[in-house]
Image (tube, rainbow, N blue to C red):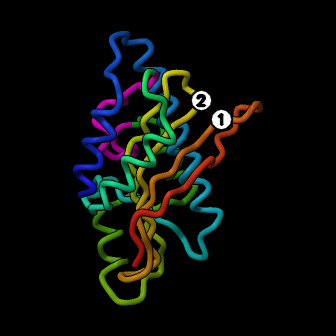
Amino acid sequence: MLRRAFIILAVASATLGCSSRKSDNIKVACDVAAAHASNFQKQAARPIAIVSQPSYLKPPIGEVEAFLRDTLTAGGRAAVEKPEASPVARCPTLRKVLSDRGVIIDHSRIAALTGSEIWPIEVLRMSVPVVSADGRTATLYVSEYMGPLSGGVSLVTYRQDRSGEWIIARRQGLMRS
């Protein structure tokens, strides 16, 4: 159902015709993804890893639709291509920023570290954020896990404050384990 929810998030967004506007939204989406990675790292009790593959977990679709209705305005939605993709794959500078912060992004290393019951890392998986038409709000899916049965999936909305910082405006928990 998460895959279906990503499709709803994509359909709910209007495709942009102007390439400079699209590149602006991709930059905003990458900035929001970097802000979320930074927030996750600050709150983590252990080193973090970010998975570069998209998540295919399935949250309850009714909750997603209600959240989107409350979060993004009907007439002013702008799409980032392939919202089900990972921002690590879509954002050219994000990979370097994460690497400089000591974030593990290598899939085989993450798989090796999460192969047992006790994980020495906390794992984040994000969708590419969908950016509002005014570029000041963005919504993304996040999966945050501390172990094989410890974590969850949320739909998170960020808003840009007056100083230009991206802050969490709303978090809707969709699944917990």
Q: Callout 2, which amino acid?
A: Arg
Instruction: Residue under label 1, please give it.
Output: 160
Counting residues from the start of the chain, the first of labels 1 and 2 encountered is: 2
- Residue 67 part of the magenta-drawn span: no
- Residue at the image position 59 percent from the left and 29 percent from the top: 136
Q: What percent of the width, then of the height, locates residue 114?
A: 35, 78
Against 127, is 20 above or below?
above
Q: What percent of the width, then of the height, locates residue 159?
A: 62, 38
Residue 120 horizontal side relative to residue 7, left or right: right
- Residue 83 part of the magenta-drawn span: yes
Question: Residue 136, which numbered label?
Answer: 2
| Image quarter of the N terminus | bottom left
Q: Nearest the camera: 138 or 118?
A: 138
Q: Nearest the camera: 71 or 89?
A: 71
Against 93, is 21 above or below?
above
The magenta stretch spans which residues? 76-90
- Residue at the image position 39 percent from the left and 68 percent from the top: 175
Q: Secondary structure at mark 1?
A: strand
Q: Secondary structure at mark 2?
A: loop
Q: Are marks 1 and 2 in contact (CB under 8 Å)?
A: yes
Q: What percent of the width, then of the height, locates residue 164?
A: 70, 32
